[in-house]
Image (cartoon, rainbow, N blue to C red):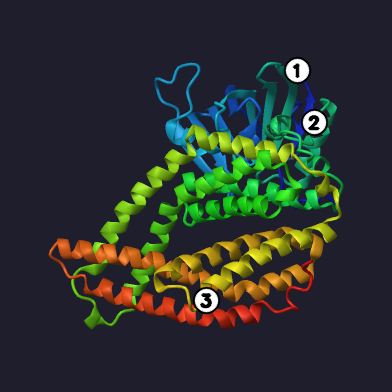
């Protein structure tokens, strides 16, 4: 009995170069074979000499043929669903076209100082045969390609083979089995990889042996370098998101760079400071340069929400419109400044130095000690720094004019401790996690206090601008007063929040 159920997959077969097309006559259910005109399809892959785009999960290629106008394809990593961008090739591009500016800007962060050029090419000479039944209904499509794959660079490797793809339409199992038999007769076998996947493997750099270079597994140096490597990867991903102008991208880039910097500071004894101190300075400067863009984003949201929460009688004048105009300009200027920073030679040098640190870490002898013993001692040193900062921030004798700065210093020390504790989690486990959780409420209060400080500066400026324009700044003054009151409340709450977090039990793992 013939199985007439249809298969629901396509299959690719491969054979030596020059393998002839399989016989397609007298197949079950096929009334005629419609052979389409031959066409040439080329995919030219672009990357840096050391294939940085491929390593970052970015695919940039120029596609020609297949009955479509030539166009650039840029595929960007975006979680589980990559983003695909398409740009037509300019009519006057010539034989060696340059990457369009809008695509080059997106990949610049991954390519950095290295220019992109053709690094690989796939050429297919294609013949398609449509297998039709007596009603001219498509049963299956047989795509016969003579494939040439070449890697381009100082050394050029060329491979060639025949590839046949079976694309099922309405074919039943009897027809598919007949086709598979004909393919086998021609010397074709199921292919493990498509040409595009094979080129991807050839271009993808071998994984860096970071763990081996960081010392013995379980050592303090290995734990630290694993953390730094993760933050470096995060910085690369967020750099791309910033260039795509995605929400919260600047903030996440700042967080990743701050984590890297804080880890270098908290674990200074494990690395050669002549290498790390300049990086700490560079990362600190990067944080300062990104701050205006992040502040504009946060303030826009905070003040907009604050105005929306006011009673109607407290909204005097076109305050929402004024606020929107102000932050539209602020955010546009800040974004332009951020992109200038990311494209600067200084930033490219910093990225290269961070790469070099992770790939060739200058570990000290102390880094070879067991992480479970060494890491808690270094976290304890950072914890004492926070303790001293909190003592100043909560001291009633500190003048009001210095209170905001003192609380901000405690906030920065708290962040360093939080990130130092993140490094420690793989080695210490539950105790480090509980410690971080215990400090969360206190750290959140410090963060909110700083938000009120920055917001009050912006509200004062908005009020002054409204007054200068002959408008009413009263509503901004109301929000200023609310933020000032909230800051005072946080300052009163800090001693209690600190005593609840800073218990002997929570920090007994510190040595």
Mark 2–mark 1 Cα distance, whole angstroms, equals: 14 Å
Label 3, secondary structure: give it.
loop
From the top left corner, tell me how far across and down residue 390 is, in percent.
57, 71
From the top left corner, tell me how far across and down residue 11 is, in percent.
74, 40
Q: Is residue 83 visible?
A: no
Judging depth in this view, the residue of 278 and 75 nearest the camera is 278
Q: Residues within 10 Å of mark 2 (few under 14, many from 20)?
A: many
Q: Reading the chain from its start, which is encountered first: label 1 or label 3?
A: 1
Residue 277's disc number:
none
Residue at 65% over, 63% down: 417
Q: Reading the chain from its start, which is encountered first: label 2 or label 1?
A: 1
Give the number of the mark in front: 2 or 3. 3
Q: Which residue is mark 3?
A: 395
Q: Which residue is mark 2?
A: 183
Q: Which residue is mark 1?
A: 18
Give the number of the mark in front: 1 or 3. 3
Q: In screen coordinates, is 159 left or right of 285?
A: right
Label 2, secondary structure: give it.
helix
Location of residue 295 with respect to 150 vertically, above or below: below
Q: In screen coordinates, is 136 left or right of 160?
A: left
Residue at 57% over, 27% down: 114
Mark 2–mark 3 Cα distance, whole angstroms, equals: 84 Å
Furthest residue in direction front, as rendered: 397
Location of residue 231 with respect to 491 vertically, above or below: above
Q: Quadrant of the C terminus?
A: bottom right
From the top left corner, tell me how far across and down residue 192 is, in percent.
79, 36
Q: Reading the chain from its start, which is encountered first: label 2 or label 3?
A: 2
Judging depth in this view, the residue of 406 and 306 nearest the camera is 406
């Amino acid at each position: 009995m013939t199985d007439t159920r249809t298969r629901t997959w396509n299959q690719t077969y491969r054979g030596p170069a020059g393998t002839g097309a399989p016989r397609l006559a007298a197949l079950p259910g096929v009334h005629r074979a419609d052979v389409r005109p031959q066409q040439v399809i080329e995919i030219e892959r672009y990357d840096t000499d050391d294939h940085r785009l491929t390593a970052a999960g970015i695919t940039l290629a120029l596609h020609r043929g297949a009955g479509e106008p030539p166009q650039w394809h840029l595929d960007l990593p975006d979680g589980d669903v990559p983003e695909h961008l398409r740009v037509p090739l300019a009519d006057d591009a010539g034989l060696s076209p340059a990457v369009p500016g809008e695509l080059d800007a997106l990949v610049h962060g991954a390519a950095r100082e290295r220019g992109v050029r053709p690094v690989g090419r796939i050429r297919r000479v294609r013949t398609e045969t449509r297998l039709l039944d007596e009603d001219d209904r498509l049963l299956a499509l047989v795509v016969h390609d003579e494939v040439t794959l070449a890697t381009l660079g100082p050394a050029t490797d060329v491979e060639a083979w025949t590839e046949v793809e079976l694309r099922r339409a309405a074919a039943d199992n009897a027809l598919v089995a007949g086709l598979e038999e004909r393919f086998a007769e021609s010397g074709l076998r199921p292919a493990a990889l498509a040409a595009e996947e094979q080129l991807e493997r050839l271009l993808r750099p071998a994984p860096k042996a970071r763990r081996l270079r960081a010392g013995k597994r379980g050592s303090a140096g290995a734990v630290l370098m694993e953390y730094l490597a993760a933050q470096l990867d995060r910085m690369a991903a967020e750099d791309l998101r910033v260039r795509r102008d995605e929400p919260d991208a600047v903030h996440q880039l700042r967080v990743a760079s701050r984590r890297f910097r804080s880890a270098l500071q908290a674990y200074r004894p494990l690395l050669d400071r002549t290498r790390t101190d300049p990086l700490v300075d560079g990362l600190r400067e990067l944080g300062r340069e990104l701050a205006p863009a992040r502040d504009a984003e946060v303030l826009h949201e905070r003040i907009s929400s604050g105005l929306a929460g006011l009673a109607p009688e407290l909204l005097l004048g076109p305050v929402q419109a004024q606020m929107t105009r102000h932050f539209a300009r602020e955010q546009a200027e800040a974004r332009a400044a951020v992109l200038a920073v990311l494209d600067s030679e200084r930033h490219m040098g910093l990225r290269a130095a961070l790469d070099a640190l992770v790939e060739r870490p200058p570990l000290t002898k102390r880094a070879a000690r067991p992480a479970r013993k060494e890491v808690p001692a270094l976290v304890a040193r950072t914890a004492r720094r926070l303790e001293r900062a909190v003592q100043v921030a909560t001291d009633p004798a500190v003048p009001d004019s210095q209170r905001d700065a003192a609380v901000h210093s405690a906030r920065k020390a708290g962040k360093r401790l939080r990130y130092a504790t993140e490094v420690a989690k793989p080695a210490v486990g539950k105790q480090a996690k509980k410690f971080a959780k215990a400090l969360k409420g206190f750290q959140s209060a410090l963060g909110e206090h700083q938000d009120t400080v920055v917001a009050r500066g912006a509200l004062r400026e908005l009020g002054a601008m409204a007054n200068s324009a002959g408008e009413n700044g009263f509503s901004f003054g109301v929000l200023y007063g609310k933020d000032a009151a909230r800051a005072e409340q946080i300052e009163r709450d800090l001693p209690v929040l600190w005593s609840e977090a800073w218990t002997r039990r929570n920090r007994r793992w510190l040595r």
